[in-house]
Image (spheres, coloured by chain):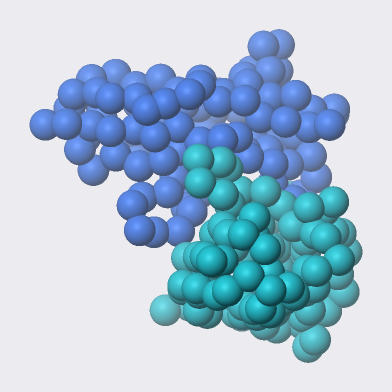
Chain colours: A blue, B cyan
Amino acid sequence: GDSVTQMEGPVTLSEEAFLTINCTYTATGYPSLFWYVQYPGEGLQLLLKATKADDKGSNKGFEATYRKETTSFHLEKGSVQVSDSAVYFCALYRQAGTALIFGKGTTLSVSS
Amino acid sequence: DTGVSQDPRHKITKRGQNVTFRCDPISEHNRLYWYRQTLGQGPEFLTYFQNEAQLEKSRLLSDRFSAERPKGSFSTLEIQRTEQGDSAMYLCASSRGIRSGLNNEQFFGPGTRLTVL
């Protein structure tokens, strides 16, 4: 069945460092891909999305490109801040309106 | 606040008791989803509704679990004869409809944390 695999954390970085969190997926057809973020004590929030191959999603300095040839959707940010400390989840769905399938999450900790 | 709300935020119960959680979606959203998240894992899908119709149930949803959305607005998730393995965060999400694109984004509530002793 469909699945999402994320790099294991925690990821610990200093402020202004470059961030990459790897995400690969297995799915039939052409899924839509998402990154969600969960800040401490808060609910899941959509960070960015991409609905077709070569689309780039971006938000708050984060970017991810839908790479069908490598079935990947890696999250990147050029300069992280302490406020980016959170758990990041990669997710997909095969069809709009159906269930999201999540990876296990990657914890990011940024120190000043 | 017009986001997704869930009640209660925390529930502690003894094994064997029944519990019920409530979710109030964003008012114009006609799809409502339930997920379960255990420690160190991503959310796992349980079930979803289109208005009052329950369209899909995961294999995770055992016979002890039942969900309803009687008038197509709020939803309840009941767990009967709770077990320690039911301890988790139960998340509710809602979305506008079945069309692809931005309008189908799933918005999540803060979750109900269940602890079964």
User: Which x, y percent locates residue B39?
Assistant: 51, 46
User: Which x, y percent locates residue A17?
Assistant: 23, 20
Farthest top residue in view: A69
Q: How many labels does the image show?
A: 0
Q: Residue at x 79, y 79 (%)?
A: B68
Q: Quadrant of residue B19?
A: bottom right
Asked if A28 appears above or below A59 in the picture, the reply is: above
| Residue in the foreground of this view, choosing between A101 and B100 | A101
Q: Quadrant of residue A50?
A: top right
Quarter holding the C terminus of chain B? bottom right
Farthest left residue in view: A112
| Residue in the foreground of this view, choosing between A70 and B70 | B70
Residue A63 seen in this snapshot:
no
Q: Which residue is drawn at 60% across and 34% down?
A: A103
Asked if A30 appears above or below B83 in the picture, the reply is: above
User: Which x, y percent locates residue B94?
Assistant: 64, 66
Q: Which residue is drawn at 56% across and 49% down?
A: B38
| Residue in the foreground of this view, choosing between B62 and A87 | B62
Q: In which quarter of the image is residue A26?
A: top right
